[in-house]
Amino acid sequence: MEPSLPSDPLDASSRRFARWTKVLAGAVVALALAGAVLGWWAYRRGGAPVPALKGALETWSSAEEKQALADYLKAQVKAPGFDCKVVTVAKKQNYWTIAKAAKLNIDTLIGFNPEMEHLDAYVGRPVLLPNQKGSLYQVGETRTPEAIEEEFGLLSGTVRAANKVGWRGLAEGQVLFLPGIGPKQMTASMQAIYARRSFFRSPLAGRYTSLLGNRVDPFTGVIRHHNGVDIKAAFNAPVAAAADGVVKLAGWNDGFGKCIIIDHAEGYRTLYGHLNEINVKIGQKVKQHQFIGRVGLTGRTTGPHLHFTIWKNGKLQDPLKYLW
């Protein structure tokens, strides 16, 4: 029997190197897999924590604060195509004309400017203007996106789809964009104005051709006070009651021609003038949106439209503050 030869030290070294190479390769693969899992988890959770804004949004009113908020939203909102900018109110502008020019509604303008105390637009006032309908919402306490969606009736996944959400979830002070909904955070005075809106609805769709206040009388050329708004509409377009109430007048009323007056709760009264048809009677109870007549050109008028007036306890009210 031949004696066995001693092992080659080079072969042993090669085997050890091979073993360590396999160990290192396995570690690299494991780290790569762990990184992929962590990356996927971070992606699902929205990445790094989202910064919060200091102070309530209701205090952010200067042009500099508005611009800082615009920059914040551009960085944190994920909604496709979202953008926002700061504009200033110009002469002969109001919040309705600003919103209309941007293809938005007045609700969005209020929702993106929660510091508003009223709806009087002063020249030079900064306004945060987005390019999509919706509202801002500042997280006041630790909440989940799902809880916010449930509270505001949003579809599941809306908050995460529209906003960056950190791996820790939503942070107190974080500002979210909630697409397609009305304002959720307002000053106390704006809340009162907004609640008033729910009481009335526009009697018909149309363009305002004359507002409350002094104007040149189209017949005499003399400046006279106009006690309501004129809403342009097609001849015989249906007119609805702006709120629940009881009909107090249904007939001819001097310059208003064929006219309806309705008394409502809380001391409100509305007038619908220049009608072609009247389809209610004195003493009749009517519901909001109920058909009451048709647009005409009776009385002192230059064309078919509806004259609409609101009083509260006998005092004239600006219909634009009720009909948004």
Image (cartoon, grey):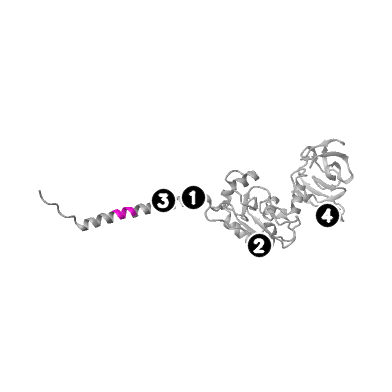
Residue that badge 4 annotates:
213
- What x and y, as percent, mark residue 95? 72, 55
Q: Farthest residue in the bottom direction?
A: 64
Whole-Å distance between the Cαs marked 2 and 4? 35 Å
Q: Amino acid at mark 3?
A: Leu
Q: Residues within 10 Å of mark 3 (few under 14, many from 20)?
A: few
Q: Are marks 4 and 1 in contact (CB under 8 Å)?
A: no
Q: In the rendered structure, which disc, 4 or 1, sits on the residue that comes first in sequence? A: 1
Residue 314 in picture, x, y percent from top left: 88, 48
Can you identify the residue that label 1 sits on? 41
* Callout in the foreground (1, 2): 1
| Image: 279 above or below 268 | above
Q: Secondary structure at mark 1?
A: helix
Secondary-structure class at tag 2: helix
- Above or below, 18 relative to 198: below
Q: What predominant SS class does the magenta segment belong to?
A: helix
**Left or right: 121, with 83 as reference point:** right
Q: Name the residue carrying label 3.
A: 33
Ranked by sequence position, the earlier of labels 1 and 2 is: 1
- Looking at the rendered structure, the kind of residue marked 4 is Gly
Q: Which amino acid is tagged 1?
A: Trp
- Earlier in the chain: of badge 3 and badge 4, it is 3
